[in-house]
Image (cartoon, rainbow, N blue to C red):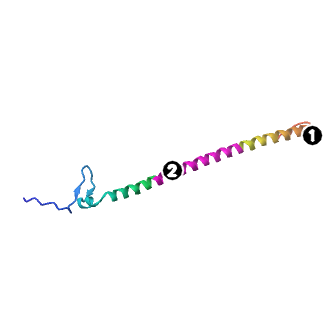
Amino acid sequence: MKRREESPHDQVRAPQSSASVFPHTKAAAGPRDDSVGFLVAQDKVDAAVNKSVDVQLEAEAASERAAQTERTASEIRQSKREMLEWMRNLERQVFGYAQNG
């Protein structure tokens, strides 16, 4: 049986990979192509990092707003307790006893 000669257009399997590589297209890729791909990938990484920083800042701002809301609610509850106590004292002064209810 005669063995067939390989041409540059034949597919070659990359070692330990199922991906096909065309030797002629791989050889045609120069350093500029690699750097462009790297820059595109770096831009995507930078965008992801910036987005994660933005999300972190938004989370911190939301956490601060929640803490401020809790402080405000606590102040309102305290004010309500003080007003209730003041009203009961006033009732005692006017009626001589605190009304239940």
- Element type where label 2 sits in the image: helix
Residue 91 or residue 66, whichever sits in front: 66
Q: How many dots with numbers?
A: 2
Q: CA distance from mark 1 to mark 2?
A: 62 Å
Residue 15 or residue 26, whichever sits in front: 26
Q: x and y percent of residue 65 in the render?
A: 65, 47
Q: Is residue 21 magenta?
A: no
Residue at 20%, 61% in the rendered image? 10
Q: x and y percent of residue 14 in the render?
A: 25, 53
Residue at 22%, 57% in the rendered image? 12
Whether residue 85 sits left or right of residue 21 in the image: it is: right
Q: Is residue 58 magenta?
A: yes
Q: Is residue 11 above or below residue 63?
A: below
Q: Residues within 10 Å of mark 1 (few under 14, many from 20)?
A: few
- Residue 94 occupies quadrant: top right
The boundaries of the magenta stretch are 46-72
Q: Quadrant of the C terminus?
A: top right
Residue at 13%, 60% in the rendered image? 5
Residue 16 or residue 22, whichever sits in front: 22
Are the two marked residues, 1 and 2, in contact with CB atoms closer than 8 angstroms?
no
> For mark 1, what is the residue?
94
Residue at 48%, 50% in the rendered image? 49
- Element type where label 1 sits in the image: helix
> For mark 2, what is the residue?
52
Q: x and y percent of residue 72 in the render?
A: 71, 45
- Tell me the chief SS of the magenta region: helix
